[in-house]
Amino acid sequence: MQIDHQSNAPQPAAIVPDVAAKDATATAQNAEFVNLVGLSREELTEAMTSIGQPAFRARQLWNWIYHRGETDFAKMSNLSKDFRAALTERFVVQRPAITVDRQSIDGTRKWLLKFPDGQEVESVHIPEEDRGTLCVSSQVGCTLTCKFCHTGTQKLVRNLTAAEIVGQVMNARDHLGEWPSPQDGRMLSNIVMMGMGEPLYNYENVAKALKIVMDSEGISISKRKITLSTAGVVPMIERCGQELGVSLAISLHAVTDELRNEIVPINKKYPIAQLMQACRDYPTLSNARRITFEYVMLKGINDSPADARALVKLIKGIPAKVNLIPFNPWPGAPYERSTDAAINAFSDIVFNAGYASPVRTPRGEDIMAACGQLKSESVKLRRSARDAAA
């Protein structure tokens, strides 16, 4: 099996013209208003009744906010002038401010987004010929300390709110020009909760946000097009399947507890046997809706033929596919990427055992937007700016 990946050498990346200063000013001005983005249907109804409006106004607003993507109450033409004026006095429809907007030579686009408290996260849009996937963050920093992931070297600052999670999706829609929500030919067709953070350690906000994203009268991205990735928060996996029904991805990366304890430390709390049982019990699991096991390829660490055979044995009986991820290096990383030959041999063993085993082509490496690299480039940029000002 052949693997196609970019050179590790830095390549020129496009800096997309932006309106970050304008957005930051708007954020500061709107800090005292209630943001309607991120409210559930029930909360939006309560907000409307609190200003003396009938409940059906919430449905009208839902359409304007999540189907049409409108942020200006004055342009919501089927609402009365008095109602629009009342909204303007109390509420906003606010996106995150954009600090950095970068586009890779391969078309991948990364946004560094800033929230009213000054905290930042990154989200990444990865275009394909027949679809486009948005990688969404769930935390500022990360709860976990996976050794191969640069985000894991940054301490958890806080969970993102539902508004901040939904805002990442709406920001991408803004820049892709996909309002009103298209039904076919979308450039944002899929969502993966694989950005910064562990989604199941921020489950309430993640669930609230994804329910908004999945709502058929709004953004309307099907649960079949949404994948939630977890490093293995076992007690929350079943609840996620029951309440959301999204596809599940497991950041596995090792086939023994000894190694996984080292590179994915959450394994010390929820070892592999417990994790595999949770996968076997996952609601909606079937041959049509397989679990994806993510496996980063680390040279001389977890990439041997024996590891591949152990992986096949481990997932036996689980409808699954295995995504092999060539390690994406970052400054000071303790590992190296496996050789193409080792990755191909590993993939062949898994494939011959009856499991799809695609090798993920690294995307956005030139802008530090590849898997495991999020936030590192933005941290470097901010440090460079501080040094220049000193």
Image: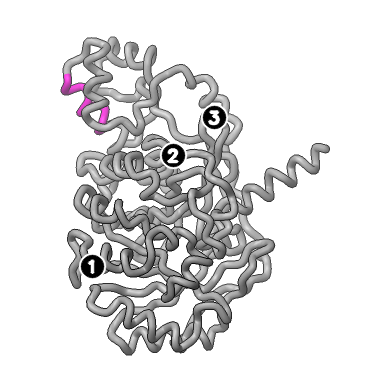
Q: Earlier in the sequence, mark 3 or mark 1?
A: 3
- Give the camera-side residue of 185 and 27: 27
Q: Earlier in the sequence, mark 2 or mark 3?
A: 3
How many marks can you see?
Answer: 3
Q: Residues within 10 Å of mark 1 (few under 14, many from 20)?
A: some
Q: Secondary structure at mark 3?
A: loop
Q: Earlier in the sequence, mark 2 or mark 1?
A: 2
What type is the residue that disc 1 sits on?
Arg
Q: Which mark is residue 160?
A: 2
Asked if the magenta segment contains residue 56, the reply would be yes
Quick check: 80 above or below 310? above
Quick check: 241 above or below 311? above
The secondary structure that most of the magenta stretch takes on is: helix
Q: Quadrant of the N terminus?
A: bottom left
Q: Nearer the viewer, mark 2 or mark 1?
A: 1
Quarter of the image holding residue 180?
Answer: top left
Quick check: 389 above or below 105? above
Left or right for 220, reference 311: left
Residue bearing the label numbered 3: 117
- Give the camera-side residue of 105 and 303: 303
Asked if the magenta segment contains residue 348, the reply would be no
Q: Which mark is residue 280?
A: 1
